[in-house]
Amino acid sequence: GDGGDAPSVGEQAAEQAASNEAAADSDAKPSTTTSDRHISIQTKLEGLEMLVDLNGAGRKSCPLCPEEKFKACYSHKLRRHLQNLHWKVYVEFEGQRMCICHLPCRNLKPGLGGDQASGRHVAHYHCVVCSVTIARKTDMVSHLKRHVNKGETEASYSGSSDVPFEEPDLTNLQITLNNNMMCLCDLAFNVSAAPSGQAYEIMKELGTNVQLLPNHTTPQKSDTYFNRKMKTNRQLVFCSLAVLAEERNPLECLDAFGATGIMGLQWAKHLRNAVKVTITDISDTCVKMIKENCELNHIRVDGGSRGPRGPEVASSEAKGVAIATVEVAKMDANVIMHLRPFDYIHLDPYGTAVNYLDAAFRNVRNLGIISVTSTDTGSLYSKSPNVTLRHYGCHIVRTEYFKELAARMVVATVARAAARCNKGIEVLLAVAMEHFVLVVVRVLRGPTQADESAKKLRKLVHCQWCEERVFLKQGNMVDDTLPCNCHGSLPGKTAVQLGPLWCGPLFNTGFLRRMLSAAVQHSMDDIQPLVKTLICESECTTLKSLVHGPSAFTNQGKTSDTSPPMCDLSLMFEFTACPVSSAVECGVVIKTLQGGEESGPDQSGKRKTGEEPANVVKKLKSDASLEHPPFYYSIHRHSIRGMNMPKLNKFLQYLTEAGFRVSRTHFDPTGVRTDATLEQFKSVLTKYSVPTYTNAAAAQRSVSTEKML
C-alpha cells in the first residue's frame, strides 16, 4: 500500500514542477500529445460550450473563470459570457483558437504592498504548440512567429498522440501521403515531415512540385524563400524563354537565384531538350532543397544528387526514367556569370538587382535575353528617394505615372550596365505590378548598339502642378520644353528634372505576340489577359481594333464600359502565328520570319552569323515609327470637379475620333496611354463630361413652372 502511494505523490510533484517551469519559460519545449492542450484551445464555439452543461437547470460556473471573477449564473447568461468574452478575445493559429483564460494557471500578480496573497490572477493565453502561458496578445503572436520560423508547428508535435481529438488527425494524413507518394501529382498542397523535425508542404505550380519549409514566406528567416504572389512574374519569364527557345536551341539558361528552384524546374519540365538549365544559389540549404525538388519532379541532377526525404526515394526509383536534366551549383551569381556564357539569364534577387548587372552582361551571348526582376518597390515607387539615388542613380518624385517611371528607371540602369560592356539593348517587355518590376531585354553586341542605347537615356521634365511631362532634348531649356503654361502663370519654379530615364519603347509587339502563343500552348490562362493588354499598349490601340482592324473604332461604343474589351482567343492566336504578310497588316514586323530569307535568329539551332545582327538592327530602325507614346494620363486624376466623366471605353473612342492614338495600360486601370498632350486630353474630357447638377436643375425648373401654372 505504501509502495503504491509514493509514486503517485512523486508524479504529482513532477507535474507541478513541470507546469511551473512552463509558465516561467516562454520558449519551453513543445508538447508531444494533443491531450495536453488546455481547455481554452478550441476550434469551434460548440467545443467551448461543451465544457459545461448549458442545457441543465440551475446556476453554473464558467469553466475558464474563477468563482471570484465570474459568479455562477444561469445558462443563458453563461452562454453570452462564453461567446462575448472568451470566444471573441482570442489568438488564432492554424485553425485553433487560443481563447482568453482567467484561471489561476499563472502566478498571482503582487498587490500594491508587495503581498502576493492580496494580488490578482492575470488573464492569459495558452500556446497551442508548447503550452506556455503568455499574458499579452501581441506577445503571443510574436511567440507563435518564433515557432513558425523554427519550423515548430502544432502539426509537427502531434505525432505520438493516441488520444482522439476533434480536429482531423494530421499524423494519419501524413502517413497516408507518405505511403501513397504517387498521389502527390494530383495535390496542390500536402503535409509531410522532415527528419530534422520541421514540417514542410509540397506546392504545385504549372505542373511542378516543390517542397516548402514552414518559414518560406519570411525572407529574413528562410533561405528557401517562396512568394506565391510572384506567380505572374514566373509565367511571364517562362513565356519569354519559350519564345527564345523557338528561335534557337538548345539554349543555355541560368536561374541565378534558385531558392526552391521552382523557376528553373518549370523551364526544364516543360521545354525539355530545348533548354539546358543551370540553377545556382549561395545557400547550402537552398542547394539541398533544389536537388530534392529535382527528384520530386523526376528530373536528373547533373553531377549526382542526394535523394529526397523519406519515401520519395522509392517512388522516384519506381518512376524510372528522368524527363530532363538540370545542373545545380552552389555558387555566387556574379561568379558563375563571369565564368560561363549563357543565352538566357534571369536575375531575381531579394531586393534590387543592380549589383549583378555588370556580371550578367559580361558573358551573355549575342541576341541573348536578360530578364531582371526587382522587388525593392520602396525605392522604385518613390517611397525612399535617397535609396533610389543610391541604387539607380536617378532622381524621382511621386507622380501619377510612378509605375512606368519605375520601369523606365530600371531599363535605364540595365542600359548603362550593358553600355559598360560595349553592348546595347532592345527592350522586349517591361511590367510593373504591385510587388515587382520585370524588365526583359535582348542584348545587341557592339559599340554602335551601345551608343544607340545610351542616346535613349534622357532627363524627364515634370510639372509638379499639372503633372504634364516631356523628355528633355539636348540643348533645350526647361521652361521652353513643357507644353503647359504653369511656369508663366504661377510664381516660383513648377518644373523639376527627373531621371535619367529610358525614353525608348518598353514593348516589342512581335515578341509579345509570340509570348501570347506560348501562354496559350502551355495553358497559362492567368497571364493571357495581361499579355493581350501589353500587345495593345505596345501598338497604342484598343483590343477590339487590334483584332478586327481600324474599322472597329466606330463600334467601340458597343463594348463594356466597366472593363477593357476582350477578344476571342482563337482570333488573337491567329494573329500570333500569322506569317509575315499578316503581321505587317497588323502593324508589326516580327523578326522570326517563316520564309527562307530569315533575318531573325535561326530556328535550326545554329548561332548567328556576322550579317544577321545588322539585319536585325535595320529592322529595329524600321519599327521606330510604331513606337508607343511614353507615359499615360489617369482619367480620375484629371477629372473636372462638378462634372460626370464619360465611361473609360467611351472616352477612348472619343479620343480616337479626335485623331489621337489611344490604348489602355497595365500600369494603371484608370490610365490612358495617348499621344495627345495634357491640354488636348483635358479638352476632350471636358467636352464629353456632363455637369452633375443638370438633372437637379431641370427638375427644379419644372417644379417652379408647375407652381406658376
Image: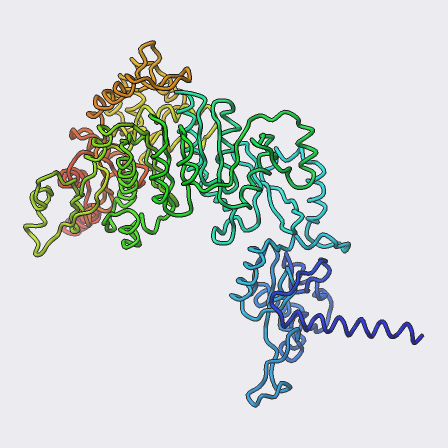
> Residue at image x 64%, y 78%?
107
Q: Nearer the viewer, residue 194 or 565?
A: 194
| Lateral position of residue 113 relative to residue 668, left or right | right
> How did the renderer colour the structure?
rainbow
Between 251 and 395, the residue placed more toward the observer is: 251
Up/down of 86 relative to 464, above or below: below
Quadrant where the N terminus lies?
bottom right
Q: What x and y, as percent, mark residue 528?
A: 41, 30
Q: Position of residue 476 (x, y in %)?
A: 8, 41
Q: Is residue 418 placed above or below 218 in the rendered structure?
A: above
In the picture provided, is 631 more to the left or to the right than 266?
A: left
> Most extreme residue toward the right, as rendered?
1
Direction left: furthest residue:
488
Residue 289 percent coordinates (x, y): 57, 42
The image quadrant of residue 162 is bottom right
- Give the side of residue 437 with respect to residue 30, left or right: left
Between 335 and 215, the one nearer to me in the picture = 335
Regarding residue 80, the answer to whether it shows in the image is no
Residue at the (53%, 36%) spot, across then down: 328
Q: Which residue is pictured at 87% across the width and 75% down the height?
A: 6
Q: Residue furthest top?
A: 596
Side of 574 relative to 49 (left or right): left
Indicate the quadrant where residue 319 lies.
top right
Q: Nearer the viewer, residue 591 or 637?
A: 591
The answer, for residue 343, to whether it is visible in the render is yes
